[in-house]
Image (cartoon, rainbow, N blue to C red):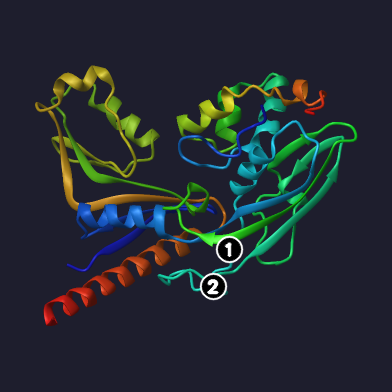
Amino acid sequence: MEPKFQILEKKEDSIKFIVEGIDVTFANALRRTILSEVPTFAVDEVEFFENDSALFDEIIAHRLALIPLKTPVDRFSLDALELDDHVVTLSLEAEGPGIVYSGDLKSDDEDVKPTNPNIPIVKLAEKQRLSFNAYARLGRGKDHAKWQPGFVYYKYLTKIHVSKDVPDWKELKELAEKRKLPVEEKEDEIVITTTSAFYLPRKFEKYVGGGIEEEVVPNTFVFTVETNGELPVEEIVSIALKILMRKSDRFISELHKVASD
Amino acid sequence: MIVPVRCFTCGKVLADKYYEFKKRVEAGEDPGKVLDDLGVERYCCRRTLLSHVELLDQVMVYRVY
């Protein structure tokens, strides 16, 4: 069966969609590929010239690494299995008093710079100085979480059947509508489609199995993908799928090699 | 010491929201509502912001060496 996509919600930094026609193994493979294989830029090495601040060099280097850097999609082949070896230098020179923000970093590459200029890096007191060069490289989430492009999770799509024999079923209907879940009213029951998490209030727990049934829609998953800003969300999903495809291709060709020996 | 750049658990960038959060809470707004407003949805991120204590201001007046 051809997988079907349906986009439920699209925001600037997140997307929510239903995929129909894939199994758990594939859903999980997609999730794991997004988290550990989609490459992004992150600070990997920092050279300090001066640091009078109260934070150690290592702490500042760690904070720098966690700042998301814009990763140009069209300039690098992000879906390749080998990473491009490209180093971007971010430099900074500051003197206190004041807060040093990610926006103060000067990049030698216009396309690779902090996506968010308001992240505080360190606070400097009077006369304290900070200057360093930070080197950003492409990397993958499997090596360090600083290279993760964002965050993903999925859930099974389920339908909750609530019989009208259950007292106060109207309450559940209102609750589901408040959570913006699609509710279908039939002659003797209501059907709630859980496009996001829906927890039964405790007073209804005793009807589960008698009056309230949860039906898992087979092979259908609700995915949520969030980006830290390095890459647009749709790009994250499409790059992950391409990487997954390339890895499978490589696996098949290795198998052929083994078989022909 | 200073605000964590990201949520310890999920990795969402939070540091940019902290000073606004602090300012608004000190002005008397309800912390929960401010977090909702800032788009901090999951409870892992909420506790990271909510439980942070900014100690750097006290420490930074002393020279380290």
A112 or A126: nearer the eye? A126
Q: Mark 2 and mark 1 in contact (Cβ < 8 Å)?
A: yes
The residue under label 1 is A71
Both labels 1 and 2 in a single chain: yes
Above-or-below relation of A36 to A214:
below
| Left or right relative to B24: residue A211 | left
Quick one: quadrant of the N terminus of chain A? bottom left
Residue A118 in the figure: left or right of residue A83: right
Q: On the rendered image, what quadrant is the C terminus of chain A found in?
A: bottom left
Residue sitting at 78 percent across and 52 percent down? A92
The location of residue A31, given as percent across then percent down, is: 34, 53
Q: Is residue A223 left or right of A215 when viewed as pictured?
A: right
Which residue is denoted by mark 2 in the rendering?
A76
Crowd band around label 1 with a 10 angstrom C-alpha radius: few (<14), some (14–19), many (20+): many
* Element carrying mark 1: loop
> In the figure, is residue B21 to the left or right of A19?
right
Could you tell me if residue B24 is visible in this image? Answer: yes
Q: Which residue sits at x=90%, y=35%?
A: A127
Residue drawn 66% across the image and 64% down it = A88
Report x, y in % for residue A121: 70, 41
Q: Can residue A231 be seen in this snapshot? A: no
Q: Chain of mark 2?
A: A
